[in-house]
C-alpha cells in the first residue's frame, strides 16, 4: 500500500515542484527582512519541510523525511539558492507564486492525510496530521522569524481549504480500504481534491472572501 | 495499572471540564486579538491539548492523545465554539475562569506525572513531563500568537504550584509502587495535591505574592 | 560503539562545562529582561538542553536526555542559580563567555552528529541532527522569550562553523566505520574539529566577518 499521489514519477515531480515553490515563498520572507544567506536557507527549508517533520514526529516516524529524504532536502536547498538570486523576479510573479503555494497546500494536505491513514490512525487523527503537514511549515517559519503566523494574518481562506481537503481525503482512503474505490479512482479523486483546494484558496483571494471572527454582540 | 485520576467516569468528567475551561481561557486570547473563527479554534485546541501533545512526543507515544482522543478533541472544539459565541459572558466570569484554569493546571500536572510514571520513567523525568503537560499548552499558544509566554508574563505563582504538585505526585506514585499506598489512598492523595495547587495559585493572585527575580546587587 | 567525546570522565567534564556555560549564556538573557527566578531557570534549562531534546525527538529516542539525564539537568539548574546570583560578574566576562559558548557549540555539534551516526542515520540526516543539537537550544530559548533567534540576529558566523563541524564529523564517523580511523584517532580528530569550530567563531567575531545576504541587484 502506498500514498496514491506518490505512486509514480509524475506525482513525485509535482511534489518536488510544490516543495520548491513553498520553499521559495518562505525564503522570500527572509530576504525581505534582510537576513544573511544561512538564515534564508534555514527559513526556506523550514517552510518547505517543517510540516512533514511535525507529521512524522507525531506519527512516531524517526528520523522524519524532512531530514532524511535526500531529494526533498536538495529541492529545498535549490529553492533557497533560487530565492537568494532571483528574489526580484519571484517577487513580481505574485499570482504564479500564490497559485503554486496553493498547489503545495493541496498536495501536502492530501499526501499528509494519506500517509497518516497508511499508519492506521483514525480518520480524525489523519485530518489533524494532514493539516499539520499543510500548515505546519508556514507556522514554524513564522515562529522562527518571530511573526504572527500567516495562517492567522492572512484573512483569506488558508486553513479552511486544507481542512476540507483532509476530510475528503480521509473519505477516499476509507473508500479504498472498504474496496469501493479502486487505485486509479483514488488517484483521480485525490487530484480533484487538490484542484478543489487550489480553487477555494484562489477564489477567496480574488473575491476577498474572509472568515467571520467571534460573534459580535452589540448589546454587551 | 492506570492513572488514578482517570480511573472512573467522575474523574473523566473533571478532566473534560478542565480541558473545556483551559481551552476557553486560550480561545479568549484569540478573540481579544480579533482573529477569525479558525484561528480561535486552533488557539483553543492548542491551549487545551498542546501540553499533552508535548508529553506524549517526549514519551514516544504516537500519535499523541491531543490528535487521537475523540472525547478530548470534541471538548476542545466545543470550548472554541463556546468562546466564539459567549466571550462577553466568559470575560466577566474572571474569578470562575481563574479557578477553573487553576483546576486544569492541577489536574494536568497530576495526570501528566502519573502517566509518565506509568511508562517507567525516572521520578525526575516524570516531574518534567508533568510540568510540560500543565504548562505546555499555554506556552505553545503564546508562541503561536507571538506573545511572551504567560508563564513569564504572569508574575503570580503559576509554574511553582505545578512543580510542587509534580514532585508530590511522584512521591505518591513511588509509594504505590512500594506497596505503601493503596489505590483508594492514591486517589485521595492526588485530589489533595490538586487542591493544594489550586490553593497556591489562588492565594498568590489574591495576596499578590510574586517570585523574586535575579539577585539585585547595588554595589555593582 | 560509543560517542568518542563521551568515552571517558575527562570528556564528560568538558561536556558538563559546556552545558553549564551554554546555560549561563541563556539565563543571562532572562536576567536582562527582569524575569522571575522560575523563568530564569526554564530559560537556562531550555538553552542548555533544548538542542539535545530536538535531536532525540527526531531520532525517536524517548524520553530525551534533556529530561532524563540527571547529571545534565543538575548542571543546567546549577547554571541558572549561578546566573541569578553572579550575573554582574558573568556579564563582565564577555570574552570568556563567548569562548565557552563557542566551545559548547563545537562539542554539541560533534557529539550530536556522532550520536545520530550511532543510530545508523545517513550522513545528511546526521549533519541536520548535529546542527539541531548545536543550534536548537538557543533557537528554542529565543522562541520562548519571543525574540528573533540569535542565529539570525548575530551577524557573525554562528551556524556556518557548526555546519562545517557536522560535515567533518560525518566524514570521521564514516572513516571509523570503514576501519580507516582507529578510536584514538577519532578522539583526536573530533577534538581538532571542535578547535576548528571555536576558531572560526572567534575569528569571525574578532575580525567582524559576516555572511552575505541575498544578491543585491541594482538594476531592479
Image (cartoon, coloured by chain):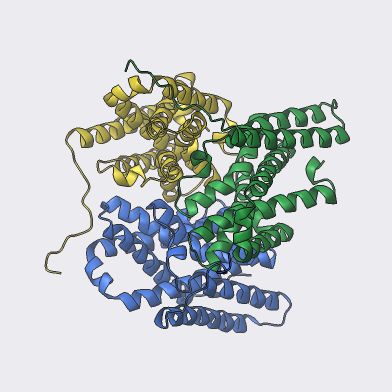
Chain colours: A green, B yellow, C blue
Residue B61, compared with residue A77, is above or below; it is above
Q: Position of residue A165 (x, y in %)?
A: 68, 33
Relative to residue C92, is residue C143 depicted above or below? above
Q: Position of residue C160 (x, y in %)?
A: 54, 72
Identify the image quadrant of the C terminus of chain B. bottom left
The quadrant holding residue A201 is top right
Taking the image as shown, residue C96 lies to the left or right of residue C194, namely: left
Q: Is residue A122 visible?
A: no
Q: Nearer the viewer, residue B180 or B89?
A: B89
Q: Residue at x 36, y 62 (%)?
A: C26
Residue A194, position as x, y percentages in the image? 73, 37
Furthest-front residue in view? C219
Which residue is pictured at 41% across the width and 67% down the height? C19
Provide residue B142's location: percent of width, then percent of height: 41, 43
C122 to the left or right of C164: right
The image quadrant of residue A159 is top right
Figure quadrant of residue B63? top right
Q: Nearer the viewer, residue B10 or B155?
A: B155
Left or right placement of residue A86 versus residue B95 in this view: right
Question: Can I make out residue C219 in this image?
Answer: yes
- Looking at the image, the residue that sits furthest to the top is A219
* x 64%, y 65%: residue: A81
Amino acid at each position: 500500500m502506498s500514498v496514491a499521489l506518490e505512486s509514480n514519477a509524475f506525482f513525485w515531480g509535482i511534489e518536488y515542484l510544490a516543495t520548491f515553490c513553498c520553499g521559495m515563498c518562505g525564503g522570500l520572507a527572509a530576504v525581505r527582512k534582510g537576513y544573511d544567506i544561512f538564515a534564508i536557507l534555514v527559513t526556506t527549508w523550514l517552510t518547505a519541510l517543517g510540516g512533514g517533520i511535525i507529521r512524522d514526529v507525531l506519527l512516531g516516524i524517526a528520523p522524519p523525511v524532512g531530514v532524511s529524504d535526500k531529494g526533498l532536502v536538495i529541492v529545498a536547498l535549490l529553492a533557497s539558492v533560487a530565492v537568494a538570486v532571483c528574489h526580484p523576479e519571484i517577487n513580481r510573479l505574485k499570482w504564479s507564486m500564490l497559485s503554486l503555494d496553493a498547489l503545495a497546500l493541496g498536495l501536502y494536505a492530501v499526501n499528509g492525510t494519506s500517509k497518516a491513514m497508511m499508519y492506521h490512525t483514525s480518520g480524525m487523527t489523519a485530518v489533524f496530521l494532514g493539516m499539520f503537514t499543510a500548515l505546519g511549515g508556514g507556522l514554524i517559519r513564522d515562529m522562527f522569524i518571530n511573526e504572527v503566523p500567516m495562517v492567522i494574518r492572512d484573512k483569506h481562506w488558508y486553513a479552511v481549504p486544507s481542512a476540507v481537503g483532509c476530510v475528503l481525503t480521509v473519505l477516499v482512503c476509507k473508500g479504498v480500504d472498504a474496496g469501493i474505490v479502486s487505485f486509479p479512482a483514488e488517484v483521480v479523486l485525490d487530484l480533484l481534491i487538490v484542484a478543489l483546494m487550489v480553487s477555494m484558496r484562489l477564489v477567496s483571494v480574488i473575491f476577498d472572501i474572509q472568515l467571520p471572527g467571534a460573534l459580535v454582540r452589540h448589546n454587551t
